[in-house]
Structures are given as C-alpha cells and as structure tokens.
Image (cartoon, rainbow, N blue to C red):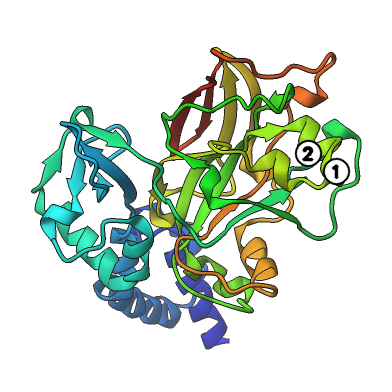
Amino acid sequence: MFVQSLLNAIRLLLSTRYDRSRISTGKLMSLPIRSLQGASRLSDWLLRSGGRRCLSRGMRLVQFRRGGGSPEVRVGVQQREGGELVDLNSFDPSLPHSMRGFLERGESGLDTAQRALSSGQHLVPLSEASLLSPITGPDKVICVGMNYVDHCLEQGVAIPSEPIIFSKFPSAIAGPCDDIIHPAQTKELDWEVELAFVIGKTGKHIKEEEALGHVAGFTVAHDVSARDWQMKRNGKQWLLGKTFDTFCPLGPAIVTTGALSDPHNLGIRCRVNGRVVQDSNTNQMVFKTEALVSWVSQFVTLYPGDVFLTGTPPGVGVFRKPPVFLKKGDVVECEIDEIGLIRNTVV
C-alpha cells in the first residue's frame, strides 16, 4: 500500500513538469503523509539530477547560415520562437556543422547546447541568419498515411488498424522558407500540413514506453503531394508522387519534448494564399509518436536524424468538390501551435 501510494505521489509530482505550485492541496492531502515525505525527497533528488536536466532540455534546435553569403551550415539553438539564435559552432568549435552530426553526439551535445543557451553569448539576430531545414541528409524520411481520424472520415474510409507506412527520399527535404518547385510532370499538386518528429537515439525493437527517449523533438512538415502520380500512375504506389525535389519542407526548428505542453494536443493548420484550408488538432492522430516509433523499429533500425511525418488532417485539395490544386505563385503556410510556422511559395 505504501509503495503504491508513493508511486502515485511521484506520478503526480512528475505530471506537473516539476512545478509544485500546480499541485492541488486536495490531491496531496489524499495521500498518506509517509508517502508524501518519500515522494518529496525523491522529487528533490530528481530535480537535482535527471529531473532538472529534463526540465532544462526545453530547446529549439536549428540549422542556419549566417548573413553575408556564407555557405557554411551552422547548428544553433533559438532562445524562443522568432528570437535570436545561439551559434553552437562558435560556442564549441568541436561540434559538427550538421544537425544529424549534433544529434549523434547524444547527451553530450544537448549538454553543450544547454550551456551555450545559458551563457547568453554568441548570439545571432534572426534578421542576420537564414534558417535551413532543421535536419538535412537523414538516413530515412518515414511517412504515415491515413493517421488522422477526421481525415479518414473525410474520405469515408475505415480507420487503419495498423500504421500505413511509406517514405520520401531525403533529397525531397527543403527549408522553412524555400520555394516548392512545381514539377512539369504533374497537374495535381496538393498540400498536407503534418507534425513531424526527429529521432535522437539509435534503436531497434523499441518498446512504446521507451519510445519518447529516442525522440529528439518535433517540427512542422509539409507533405507536398502530386496526386496524379500518387493515385493514378506508377501502379498507384505512393512514393513517386511524394518525393519530387522540394516536396518535404521542414522547420522552423526541432522543438524538444520538454518545450511542448503535449505534442499530441496541438492545433495544426494550413493556409493557402492566406485562406485556411486545414484546421485540426494533433489529438486526432490514430497512432501517436510512441506507437509509430515502436512499430517502425520492428522493421528497421532508427538512427539519429531520421524524420517521421505523422499524417495530415482533413482539408486537402484532392478531396474538395471540385478538387483544388496548387499553382505557381501560391503561398502555403503550415503551422503548429508551440512549434512554429513554415511558409513556402510554389514556383
């Protein structure tokens, strides 16, 4: 009984993100005093060690180029959305100049980023930097189809009983402000806003309860789609319709889990030329992050930098009546609460 009460107290403390001021007196008084004393001592230890480190790991990781036409890619951490960047390569010249290399450093890389962020040095105004995709050159870009309940209802199809997996080639990745190239090969270019996450730790056969420990953070994705190639040509396999160059804009940052209230309860929307065309919430996802990591890792080893696109909500152009497709000159904005916005022009 004591052990169970202590565990309940610990869960209560942890669920408040280490902020005791948010714990109601009523909930605490319902627990035995010995449990509270034990939980308090344990929570203090967590705060001093791993717990405080987890709390401090709320960061926005970016890749960028500095102004002046420098071609060199640099890794940074953003103080806040729209805020200045801390140049991690200036803070520690031994760090890799790619997000994939940085993530491969594991805990030591995150420790360095936290120290750099706390130092208040090596600041780069956002106006003097060009944000790139926060991850480039991943081993894999893994995509999930039919993963929103409301998107399934939009099409009148059954909700999947297991994740539907396809992929894009890494060469499809573009930055948060890069142009989307309208290929001459398609007349049915469509939009899809998606929550994406990036793997931060190598793993195979990962258990769901351990899955978030393999995730570096979350970002905004645009799963640009050539519907004629996806649905009518090439044997109706999805790959070619999904993987033209520039068909995977990402950004503006990889937002670590500690900086998000709940990645599975965030507003998600897409606008075309300022008009809202998709507006939903990530709580509509059929398979959440933990389930997707565990499922895919049954088949392939996941590596730092691997990108998952987790599906789109309703409102895509192909299912409108009549269908609506993107044309040159259109501006597409994909936005997710607490993560940010990417804006890409079709050219």
Separation of residues labelled 2 and 1 (CA atoms): 6 Å
Q: Is residue 31 left or right of residue 101?
A: right
Where residue 216 sits, quadrant-wise, is bottom left
Residue identifier under label 2: 230
At horizontal 34% and vertical 64% (from top left) the residue drawn is 101
Residues at marks 2 and 1 touching, judged by CB atoms closer than 8 Å:
yes
Looking at numbered disc 1 in the image, what kind of residue is underneath it? Answer: Lys
At horizontal 44% and vertical 80% (from top left) the residue drawn is 35
Q: Nearer the viewer, residue 292 or 87?
A: 87
For the N terminus, the quadrant is bottom right
Secondary structure beneath dot 1 equals helix
- The label on residue 236 is 1
Q: Is 232 situated above or below 120?
A: above
Q: Nearer the viewer, residue 180 or 186?
A: 186
Image coords of residue 269 (percent x, y): 59, 29
Q: Nearer the viewer, residue 261 or 289?
A: 289
Image coords of residue 299 (percent x, y): 69, 73
Q: Is residue 127 left or right of residue 206?
A: left
Where residue 64 sits, quadrant-wise, is top left
- The 10 Å Cα crowd at callout 1, few under 14, some 14 to 19, many 20 or more, is some
Q: Does the image show residue 230?
A: yes
Image coords of residue 153 (percent x, y): 85, 36
Q: Is 344 situated above or below 321?
A: below
Q: Is 277 situated above or below 255?
A: above
